[in-house]
Image (spheres, rainbow, N blue to C red):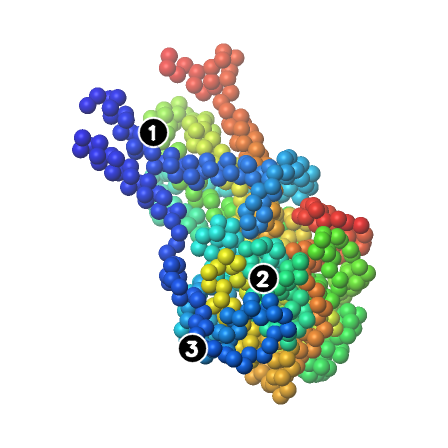
Amino acid sequence: MKKKLVSILLGAAMVVAALGGCGSEPATTSTEGTEAAETDTTEPEAEEPAQEDAAETEESADTETAEAADPADVTGEFTYWTYTDSANNLVNEFNKVYPNVNINLQVFGGDEYKTKILTALQSGTDVPDVFDLEEGYIYEFLDSELIADLSYINIDEIVKDFYGFQVAQMKDTSGAFKCLNFQSSPVAIWYLKDACEEWLGTSDPAEISAMLSDWDSIIAKGEEVYEASGGAVQLWPNLGEMPKVVAFSNDPLISADGKMTISEDWTNLIDAMRTMYDSTANAELGSWGSEWAAAWNEGKLLFRVMPCWDFFTDWEMNKGNVGVAAPFLASYEGATGICVYNNSEKKDVAGEFLKFVASDEFQKINLESYNQIPASKKVCDELAEGFSAEDFGGQNILATYSEICDKIADITPSKYTRPSINEFGKAAGEGVKAGQDNDTIIENFKSAIKDKYPEVVMD
Amino acid sequence: MNSKKRNKYAYFYITPFFIVFLIFSLFPILYSFVLSFCDMDVLSGKFTFVGMRNYQRLFESGYFFKSIGNTLLIWIMSIIPQLSIAFVLALILSNKWFRGRFLLRNIYYFPNLVTPVTIGLLFGAMFSYPGGAVNNIITMLGLEAVDFQNNQMLARMVIAIAICWKNFGFNIIYFTAGINSISDDVLEAAEVDGASNWQKITRITLPLMRPILIYVLVTSVIGGLQMFDESHLVFKSVPGDATVTMVKYLYDSAFERFQFGYAAAVAYGIFVIIIIASVFSLLVTKEKKDDYGEKKGRKGAGK
């Protein structure tokens, strides 16, 4: 009998131990079962401006009242998932203004994040109230009803001063606002001032931009530099960074409803890539590689095409020596959208958080304290006057980035937009290196898209 | 207590395994089989039955068949040196006169403890162009630096080297166990009969290690055809998708493009290929029978 009991207990213990991994992770802070998420709206505000739409007024009444109330009176808590450490800045700044809102921030690195958020949303368990999605895959998600339509926080009004391209990025295919992009990531040409002084005769961003007015002038200048330096210095990093310049200036290769149209701008890009490849301007150092970063930091490579965030500058070596210039076409890369879970019981307080990060106040802090470019054109224009960045030798980088942001087309991306740009760049780069003509390159591009997205209709 | 009663307790002991197997193995296998006939909405997880469409797409996909070719090429480039080096080193390390064999066996095993991600990044940095460690040595020798990433075969070769480096120590352990299991009497008898070292290896060691060889070969086929980490991480992008393996293709379909139904069909495609490869390797290593229907090498055994 004893043996039987022991065997049963052992068996049960093994089952429990084996299934232990199935349990949900213990939340670092308890948010379930509390009513703390409700926004405190006790202070009345009689002098709110009248809304144009009565229904809208009713819908957003709670939010407005909360807005008008002292932020310190707003209480609650919510869970926020992200893939970037910089979210700590948002939370810290938010808590300075809203000290009684507790945010359970969880940062997940690498590919793990995408899978984790996907699994949570699919299963509907342990779903964060607020979560970040990266530009590379956000448009696979945005059409879902699981992501809240941000009209409940009167998003139109909140982002009315944002750049048009930012507003366009926040929408799903039906035009509903599904995420908040609170900072801009325009693509610029990064350079070292001393290297450009030596080889281009100037480190002034406007003069450098003027020198690089199209691909032909970039290639010609690159060949001059190569010759003058005896082959020691090259101007352009690689073919892969050319599509980055044009990404959101050319018409999308595939529309949201899955129709492919390859405009002349894209075929011209292939021609430009071919000329670049045949020239001495091209260093052909793979982006984000160690050689690419080292060559640029040592002044052997003059330019890199990067968004306003950059992990590859050796600031110890080059603090004050870095400059950014506007390319001849405008684009962005690596944007982050903040979304709210539609079934969250804490949408109100989550909405307060979104409103805060979209506010002029935070947009200014985010620039001044964390070097992030505001999404708000109004804030950019306001701060651009007399702005100077120490790391960039006093350059008014905000003026440069404002110039780029003003030119970025207001395109609402779809799930095809970024992958098709990447695929086109890959097909063009490989084709040019292999000596293929444009027709072959385009056929290869179509074939790759057909394999990945068979539903795409091609002309 | 009779034996029948005792047998009942055995079921309790094996129950945990079967519960875990049902939940974590059998259920996902059946779930993905059903999924392979459906399209799945990314977030809601709703299935839409599409019949054989995913399989039709799979058979029409030149990229999938290319990924099979890439996988086989990289696997062959890695498995031949891997098993050869492991076998030779196992022979050397099995000699009792060889001092430091325990230390060396451990050292050779160390790469197997390194995570695939680390190996991927390490080899990517070592073989980068033009200033990776390997290219620095090449240029020091007065030769021109080699762009491994932009040459399809060289890129595959680098990945094969990475896999070989990681796994050869693991196979040394198996081979050493196989060699040590051979009775000294047999080898001594051969020596008395005047057999050379080469003859002892080819006529005694290798035939008697057949079960170990089959095991290593079959597990290498299964593991090799599932290669992913190294091909995913050593080089970010290689011309013509030359290093996209079958599992990388599956991963991209599922987690880059969120086409879970199609990815499930790809998984079943890979499953079929691994079965074919495993059966093939079993057939290749199967003991041949002589004219009398006896297995070669076992003639007279048991008589």
Q: Secondary structure at mark 2?
A: loop
Same-chain status of marks 2 and 3: yes
Identify the residue shown where x is 31% and y is 30%.
B11
Q: Which mark is drawn over residue A149?
A: 2
Q: Is residue A177 above or below residue A225?
A: above
Q: Which mark is drawn over residue B184?
A: 1
Residue A169 visible to the viewer: yes
Q: Is residue A72 above or below residue A343?
A: below
Identify the residue shown where x is 62% and y is 64%.
A177
- Please provide percent x and percent y for residue B266: 59, 40
- Please provide percent x and percent y for residue B155: 61, 51
Same-chain status of marks 2 and 1: no
Chain letter belonging to callout 2: A
Lower sequence index among marks 2 and 3: 3
Question: Which amino acid, mark 2?
Answer: Asp
Location of residue A371 (image quadrant): bottom right
Labels 2 and 1 touching (C-beta < 8 A): no
As rendered, which of A433 and B86 lies closer to the eye? A433
Identify the residue shown where x is 67% and y is 44%.
B63
Q: Secondary structure at mark 3?
A: helix
Same-chain status of marks 3 and 1: no
Q: Which mark is drawn over residue A72?
A: 3
- Please provide percent x and percent y for residue B273: 58, 34
Chain letter belonging to callout 3: A
Q: CA distance from mark 2 to mark 3?
A: 27 Å
Location of residue B2 (image quadrant): top left
Question: Which amino acid, mark 1?
Answer: Asp
Location of residue B66 (image quadrant): top right
Q: Say few, some or many: other residues with alpha carbon within 10 Å of mark 3 (under 14 / 14 to 19 / 20 or more).
A: some
